[in-house]
Amino acid sequence: MKKVLMTASAVSHFMNFHLPYIRYMAENGAKIYTAAAGTLDIPQVFSHTDLPFRKKLFHTANIGIILKLSKLMRKEKFDIIYTNSTLAGFCGRMALKLSGCRNTLCVHICHGYLFNDGEGLRSKIYLAFEKAVRRRTDVLAVMNADDLKIAEKYSLGKKIVFLNGMGLDQKLLPECSDELIRKTRSQLGVGQDCTLFLCAAEFSPRKNQKLIIKACSLMKRENFVLAFAGEGETVEECKSFAKEQGVSDKILFLGQRNDMNLLYRSCDCLISASRYEGLPFNVMEALYCGAQVILSDVKGNRDLAPEGSLYPFDDAKALAALMDKAGSSRPRENFLDSRYLLENTLKENAVLLKMDIIA
């Protein structure tokens, strides 16, 4: 029986992206360990370690996490280790490097580099961290064309593979009745002839919600509502900014929601103003649910964008122009390419990520 360790910054990462893969490995005889911030209790995981990763790259607490992970690796002598995301991915690979476990295969799944090639000091620092662990990255998986170019240019893994994401599970996005959609829009105060824009993302500088608010103040159309779903560090700042821009009466701050499928199917258009992405699940989900999308022209978004849906990054006027053109009625059909569905990615990804050798 192969012993597998999966690391991530938070347990929600496993639940959102990796649960089908954990089940796949368990069904094929793997003994699975996980390590991430928070508690995890799913039957396929033999043991979970709560690691309170700090999101700041240079936080001293992360040194202790690296040492704790390294100790766990020496003790258990895993056959394969899967690392995810930027910070936790670096810590996991550095821990493996320090552990001396040379027979352990390391697979890093990049859900989007938090930098662009040649874009200032910040990008150089992040790239330097990736270079520091590239010799301990046996397989590197990327999910968009821009990250593939970066990975290949700097040889950030011994073997580099391309994934069409981790796969969208259709069962989590069931169809909703027109009556339920009308009721939802009514509860939000949105008439049937009103255009409902949705932004579904954590409030952060990277997700750039203030640009969408600015665009609302520049729009010509008046019969619209913008709904933000999510929480985060910049939410209060965005609420104040909406008042400053005179559009607070057009904007709903819904907080964290557990009915995203219904919101995707009730909105007319999803907006993403992100500065960079991996392969954004919110965009895939919205497209699958039949919503239009308006996306910043950045990596990750570009891979999913329908024709005419991109606007130049940080250009509020261009975003406002696209929002003015967005329709308030749409056919409720799947706009997502089938290659991104879980039923088509699971087996292919299992091979690319070496999950087929665990049994």
Image (spheres, grey):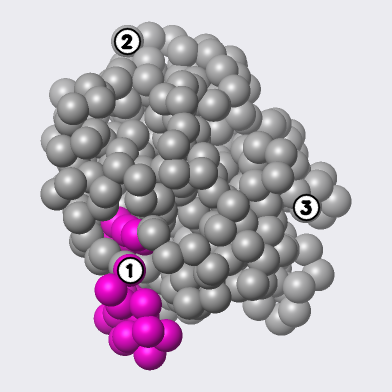
Residue plotted at (35% across, 60% down): 225
**Is 236 in the magenta?**
yes
Residue plotted at (49% across, 54% down): 271
Task: Please state which of residues 71 and 18 is positioned toward the viewer in this rendering.
Answer: 18
Query: How many numbered marks are there?
Result: 3
Percent across and percent down for residue 255 are: 21, 61
Percent across and percent down for residue 107 are: 56, 36
Q: Seen from this angle, which residue lies furthest right? A: 153
Residue plotted at (38% across, 90% down): 244
Residue behind mark 3: 150
- Quarter of the figure with the N terminus: top left
From where the camera sits, is residue 173 visible? yes
Q: Residue 210 bears which disc, if any?
A: none
Residue behind mark 1: 250
> Viewer-nearest of labels 3 and 2?
3
Residues shaded magenta: 225-250
Percent across and percent down for residue 337 are: 59, 23
Residue behind mark 2: 27
**Is 354 in the magenta?**
no
CA distance for labels 3 and 2: 35 Å
Callout 1 secondary element: helix
Amino acid beneath label 2: Glu
Task: Please state which of residues 287 and 331 is positioned toward the viewer in this rendering.
Answer: 331
Percent across and percent down for residue 305 are: 64, 41
63 displayed left or right of 206: left
> Viewer-nearest of labels 2 and 1?
1
